[in-house]
Amino acid sequence: MATQETRSRDGFVSFFRSYTKTWIHAVATAGLTAFGTLSVFHRGFIALALASYVVPPIALYLWRPSVGRDDGDAATEEGGTAAERERDTAVEDEDDAAAADRERAVATGERSTGATDAPLERAETEDRAETDAAPAGSDVSRSDRGRDTEPGARTESPADEADEIDEAGEDERGRDWRLVDVPTEATLRDVCVTAAGAVYAVGENGLVLAGAPANGAEPDAWSIVLEDGPAAEGDELAGVDATDGGDAVWVAGDSGSVGRIEAETGLHTDYTAPADITDNWLGVAVGGESGDETVLLINGSGAVLRGRYRDGAVSWDEPTKPGSGSSLSAIALALADPSVGYCCDTNDSVFETTDGGESFDRVGLEGAGGTLENLATLGRGDCLVSADDGVVHRYGGSTWTPERVGEEAICGIARREGETIACDADGVIYERTPAAEWNQVDVRAPDSLIAVSTTADGDRTVAVGEEGTVVERR
């Protein structure tokens, strides 16, 4: 997993990045080159060369025109009032100050571990709230509505869809992301929020961490279920998933580690080395209700191992390789229909199963600029795959559409009806509703985030990462 260096978020740096993409920068660069060439005749041209390159960005930054924005944004800014410009300047100043505080905290090794319920920074602006739900009829809205519709499904009008999204947006804005204090500093590799609202996270040395349901015991009652893995060997765990109702949880990791945990009692059963395979398992997907479960495991050799849990025992099929043998990086089964699922590998390939993992067909994708990291699905013809170049690729049943989310590796992605959540290697969390663009949340974890999970209703969403980092929204 790529670990990205922390990037500056100061106002001028952000402005200058946009400025370098404009024609003004191109002209200034040409002036620098031309005057620099003439300096062989007179040294005075050196001053002109430097001035031609340095003066324009400084003047533009102080004047603050809409450099680097699209035509629609520029027109809006030109037509804005003085009051709006003052408000935008104030918001930018606040963001710069917040960024400086965060960087000072990172530099001094501080971490927000005070009161468990203390909210992280969340400076919602009026403009940000208004853009959480884009109006029906926008380009993004049309592309999402263009997905195939199941026969007999109710077709909503644009107005109905907009109303639903507005309501969802209001609901989400009422919830805060916050850092959670947990009893570990081990790196957490994967997380699963069950249908019952409980949370399970796995990571270094075979650690299994559990968070009690928010509507049960103390919502922050986190405890360690396993300290050294299902076989008590201390092998790192890389994947976790739960049955439909959340009554059973499966974990998997290095040296063939596999285990099943009963959610009610916390008791676990060791199934390490299934089918006598001791490969490092890189992920696990579970479908079906407790006692009638399908378990899919993936490894670095590009193989999928399928198991069926019945009456307290597991029968394992022969492993299959959907692709060329490149390492598989993620696998998921749809909650609504566990016979449907997807997996992806490090060779730009995504595979679909419609028989619960017995067979797979390649459905894409071509020309990805980065290595595929993770994926999420709601069912057949619906899959989002994240990559380490900051792009998420959206599958609509026949075509793939790339969407730029950020600049860092998008390590974790979760999907539910009406919303997608992603997290990156720089500790940033992103949210997206069907009618809106990807929206960066105004919080930032102190360390890289690796995985994220949410409930079907979005009541609880949890992201985990390095150094025992846990960030939660509810």
Image (cartoon, rainbow, N blue to C red):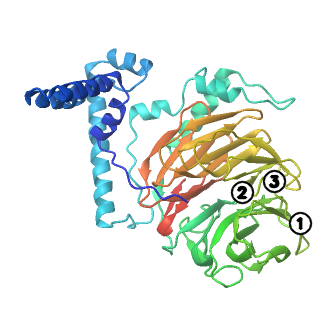
Q: Position of residue 282 (x, y in %)?
A: 68, 64
Residue bearing mark 1:
318
Which of 87 and 116 lies nearest the eye of the viewer?
Answer: 87
Which of 156 and 425 lies nearest the eye of the viewer?
Answer: 425
The circle on residue 326 is: 2
Number of marks in the rendered image: 3
Q: CA distance from mark 1 to mark 2?
A: 18 Å
- Please, is residue 47 above or below residue 194 in the view? above
- Please, is residue 14 above or below residue 287 in the view? above
Q: Secondary structure at mark 1?
A: loop
Q: Nearer the viewer, mark 1 or mark 2?
A: 2
Q: Amino acid at mark 2?
A: Ser
N-terminal of the pair, mark 1 or mark 2, is: 1
Q: Position of residue 125 (x, y in %)?
A: 38, 36
Looking at the image, the residue that sits furthest to the front is 41
Q: Amino acid at mark 3?
A: Pro
Residue 425 visible somewhere in the drawing: yes
- Please, is residue 208 above or below residue 101 in the view? below
Residue pictured at 27% horizontal, 32% vertical:
89
Q: CA distance from mark 3 to mark 2?
A: 10 Å
Label 1: few (<14), some or many (≥20) within 10 Å?
A: few
Which of 443 and 156 lies nearest the eye of the viewer?
Answer: 443
Residue pictured at 73% horizontal, 25% vertical:
156
